[in-house]
């Protein structure tokens, strides 16, 4: 008889962007895979979820104070109680809170509850408010978690040190990158792709694919880029991300006098082309789980300049495959960007190191790690 798993996340795009390869692997092994989430296709269209057997629309809210999450609890509980699931695999903070509460009754039977934490809201440098609210909630709910999967060193060590009550604790190297899709460009491929996108082959392109949220901290990056542009004129900054939330950053770019050197590209489904034709990848984020944009950069061989925060510092080894910059030190960030512009041999060295270091984060490697976690629960 086929095993049944319900994937739960706050929004549709989370499942579509990050979990379809593993879902397809479960399908290949004979699983029935359902999913429950709030549909946000209008924000992030084009994601293929056709491998999922049954989809349930749940009125989740990312806000812990929203009444919608109470409605989500009752809707999800009904699905879980009647679904005869072997496992409920939950993702995203509010999706995981609601799912673990909704699965309490089913868990007394055969249902195993798995939570992949893509980055706890409490971390080094997080606000006291985050620690006071989110930490006790997570620690309490860990007792209703058969397997807690973390994706970075800080979260893993914290859960272990704080004695979370989950039955099993794993660290998995993120969600995996498809190295068949993300692979380094030759000089000829880079030039051809640039020509297709309207960029000069001699320009130095930098890229930061990210939503325009406070957490992504674009203001630090723009200040660093201004300093860099004052020394090197023939550079360009590419910013893929939902354009409807970019207005504040566009205004800042205008105020800094660098708007003509920045391309706001909107939500994109061709990231491998954009990153592949770029010279270096950047991240000014205030915190991450394990950032997919940097793993993709590694797979494409791009040196990285990133903030020294959780998630980023799992991937970037300072002076080996890129540089780590203390949060909001935009002058130091500019210094390292300039160093890479002026030292092509260093770019080549970092590229070679990235291609070696990314192997642990490949799709094949991560799927093996996830299969091991499922085997430990008797699901495979």
Image (cartoon, rainbow, N blue to C red):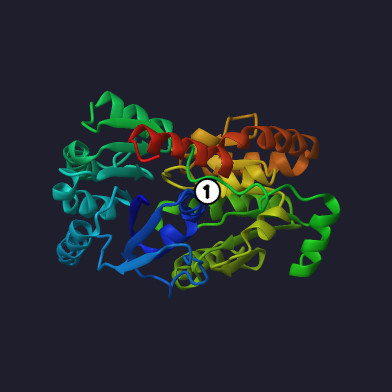
- Which of the two residues, 193 or 233, is positioned nearer the viewer here? 193
- Which of the two residues, 79 or 227, is positioned nearer the viewer here? 79
Counting every numbered tag in the picture gives 1
Is residue 122 something that shows in the picture?
yes
Q: Position of residue 9 (x, y in %)?
A: 33, 57
Secondary structure type for disc 1: helix
Q: Is residue 229 above or below residue 141?
A: below
Residue at left offset 74%, top offset 52%:
232
Q: Quadrant of residue 340?
A: top right
User: Left or right: where does residue 341 sit relative to residue 93?
Assistant: right
Q: Position of residue 338 (x, y in %)?
A: 69, 43
Quadrant placement of the C terminus: top left
At label 1, counting other C-alpha atoms closer than 10 Å, the crowd grade (few under 14, some 14-19, many 20 or more) is many
Residue at left offset 55%, top offset 64%:
253
Residue at left offset 48%, top offset 35%:
369
Q: Quadrant of residue 197?
A: bottom right
Residue at left offset 66%, top offset 36%:
354
Q: Which residue is mark 1?
A: 292
In the current view of this chain or complex, which residue is farthest to the right?
188
């Amino acid at each position: 008889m086929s095993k049944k798993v319900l994937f739960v996340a706050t929004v549709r795009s989370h499942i579509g962007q990050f979990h379809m390869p593993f879902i397809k692997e479960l399908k290949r092994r004979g699983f029935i895979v359902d999913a429950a989430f709030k549909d946000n296709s209008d924000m992030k269209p084009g994601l293929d979820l056709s491998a999922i057997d049954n989809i349930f629309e749940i009125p989740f809210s990312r806000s812990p104070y929203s009444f919608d999450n109470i409605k989500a609890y009752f809707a999800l509980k009904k699905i879980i109680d009647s679904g005869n699931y072997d496992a409920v695999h939950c993702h995203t903070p509010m999706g995981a809170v609601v799912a673990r509460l909704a699965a309490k009754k089913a868990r007394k039977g055969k249902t195993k509850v798995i939570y992949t934490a893509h980055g706890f809201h409490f971390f080094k440098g997080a606000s006291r408010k985050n620690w006071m609210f989110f930490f006790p909630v997570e620690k309490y709910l860990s007792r209703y978690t058969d397997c807690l999967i973390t994706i970075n060193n800080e979260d893993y060590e914290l859960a272990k040190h704080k004695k979370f009550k989950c039955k099993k604790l794993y660290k998995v190297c993120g969600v995996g990158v498809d190295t068949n899709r993300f692979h380094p460009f030759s000089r000829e491929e880079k030039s051809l792709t640039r020509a297709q996108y309207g960029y000069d082959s001699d320009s130095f392109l930098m890229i930061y694919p990210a939503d325009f949220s406070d957490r992504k901290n674009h203001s630090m990056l723009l200040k660093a880029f201004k300093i860099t542009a004052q020394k090197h004129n023939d550079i360009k900054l590419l910013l893929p991300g939902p354009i409807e939330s970019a207005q504040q950053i566009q205004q800042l770019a205008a105020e800094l006098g660098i708007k003509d050197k920045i391309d706001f590209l909107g939500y994109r489904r061709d990231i491998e082309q954009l990153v592949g034709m770029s010279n270096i990848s950047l991240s000014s984020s205030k915190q991450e789980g394990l950032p997919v944009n940097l793993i993709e950069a590694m797979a494409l061989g791009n040196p990285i300049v990133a903030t020294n925060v959780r998630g980023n510092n799992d991937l970037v080894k300072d002076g080996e495959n890129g540089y780590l910059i203390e949060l909001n030190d935009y002058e130091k960030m500019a210094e390292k960007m300039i160093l890479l512009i002026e030292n092509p041999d260093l770019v080549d060295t970092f590229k070679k190191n990235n291609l070696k270091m990314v192997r642990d984060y490949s799709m094949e490697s991560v799927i093996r790690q996830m299969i091991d976690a499922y085997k430990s629960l008797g699901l495979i």
